[in-house]
Amino acid sequence: MENNDLLKAVIENVVDGIIIIDDGGVILTANPSACVLFGYEQDELNGKNIGILMTEDDRPQHQDHIDQYKKTGEARIIGKGREVKALKRDGSVFPARLAVSEVKYRDRILFAGVVHDLSFEKKAAEEQQLYTSKLEAIVEERTGFLKNIVKTLEQAKDEVYNALLKEKEVNQLKAQFVSVASHEFRTPLSSIQLSASLVEQYYDKFNREKVIHHLNKIKSSVNDITAILNDFLSVERIEAGKLSPALNELDIKLTLSEIVMQMAMQAKPGQKIDYEHRGMSAKIVLDDSLLRHCIFNLISNAIKYSGEDGVIEVRTLLDENECMISIKDNGMGIPANDQAHLFEPFFRAGNIGAIQGTGLGLNIVKRYVELMQGQINFKSNEKGTIFEIILPVVPAKITA
């Protein structure tokens, strides 16, 4: 008796709903928690079909499961828990977990269902999901923000590194400038000083021939200093972005002929400058001043670094698309180890010996050619060197 009273007390006070149905789905009894859960008064569910507590979708399936179990003994929901949608008296639906067990009572087969309301858990899960989504969004936003900061810092680091590298290069160039200037200026200045003293000496003796000779040496030395200063000035103007091509119409064949004629006067004894033009004979649009500087420099180098009695070949080739200018000498050539550095400022090849120069000439030539949107290439070995300048042909009808 005590056991029955205890069991009844447990069933009537358990928080989950407990409903007993027969094999036809009729409710035999429901504990107080079940009545409260579904919105019914005590004993109001007795005699009703269990279907009134289910949605239209679940009703046929639930009865089918019971009928199938009675016929085959195959348990699809019996002894198992599953999630269902439960229907309250007011028509509202709530999520619930239903666990159905078989009960044998006085030669009858009954079914006990335990209904647990999942509304709180579902709401908590939704809130958790919402919170998680918000948290993920915040994390993603903060992560993006941090990535941007890292990217900005990386860019700043690169900019600072490049700035320091540039400053280092500038300092190196300054040091090289001082070294080259002090070295290259010393020779012509010494020559000027010596020649001036000799002029003074020969002037007193009225030796006109020797006075003129040393005056010419002074002029030549002044021209050397002027050339060095012009090279330094050109580099400064290019670095400062103050130099841009001034396009004008010119005849490439005529221009090169004039340059070759002038440079022939500077050739060593026995040296010959041979010029030949091939292709079209037409006017093109280039910067005459920049072009002349490049050609003068390359032919001057060919004269300087070639021996006497050699031939310097100057060639131009013009077609509808480009103008190619080549200067070939039979000089000492450029050592293979030095060729990669040839166009660097202040660089001088290791085999030039005592031949004077600032090491700026080819660097300026390359940058002038690039300002005219062209390119310069070279090939060199112990038998000589050939430089090729390739420039785009701008139609003469285009003005600067």
Image (cartoon, grey):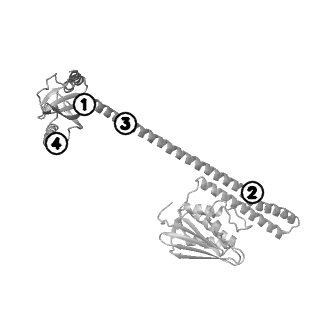
Looking at marks 1 and 4 on the same chain, the residue that comes earlier in the sequence is marked by 4
Where is residue 96? Give x, y as percent: 24, 33
Residue at which label 1 appears: 116
Residue closest to the eye, 376 or 98: 98
Residue closest to the eye, 47 or 215: 47
Separation of disc 2 and disc 3 at Cα?
73 Å
Dot 3: what SS? helix
Mark 2 residue type? Ser
Looking at marks 3 and 1 on the same chain, the residue that comes earlier in the sequence is marked by 1
Q: Are marks 3 and 1 in contact (CB under 8 Å)?
A: no
In which quadrant of the rendered image does the N terminus lie? top left
Of marks 3 and 1, the one in the foreground: 1
Looking at marks 4 and 3 on the same chain, the residue that comes earlier in the sequence is marked by 4
Tell me which corner region of the image, top left, top right, bottom left or bottom right, holds residue 263: bottom right
Q: Which mark is residue 73?
A: 4
Is the residue marked by circle 2 packed among few (<14), some (14-19), or many (20+) residues within 10 Å?
Answer: few
Separation of disc 2 and disc 4 at Cα?
111 Å
Of marks 4 and 3, the one in the foreground: 4
Dot 4: what SS? loop
In percent of the image, x 80 and y 68: which residue is there? 213
Separation of disc 2 and disc 1 at Cα?
98 Å
In percent of the image, x 18 and y 43: which residue is there? 74
Is the residue marked by circle 1 packed among few (<14), some (14-19), or many (20+) residues within 10 Å?
Answer: some
Q: Residue 182 carries which label?
A: 2
Residue closest to the eye, 318 or 67: 67
Looking at marks 2 and 3 on the same chain, the residue that comes earlier in the sequence is marked by 3
Mark 4 residue type? Gly
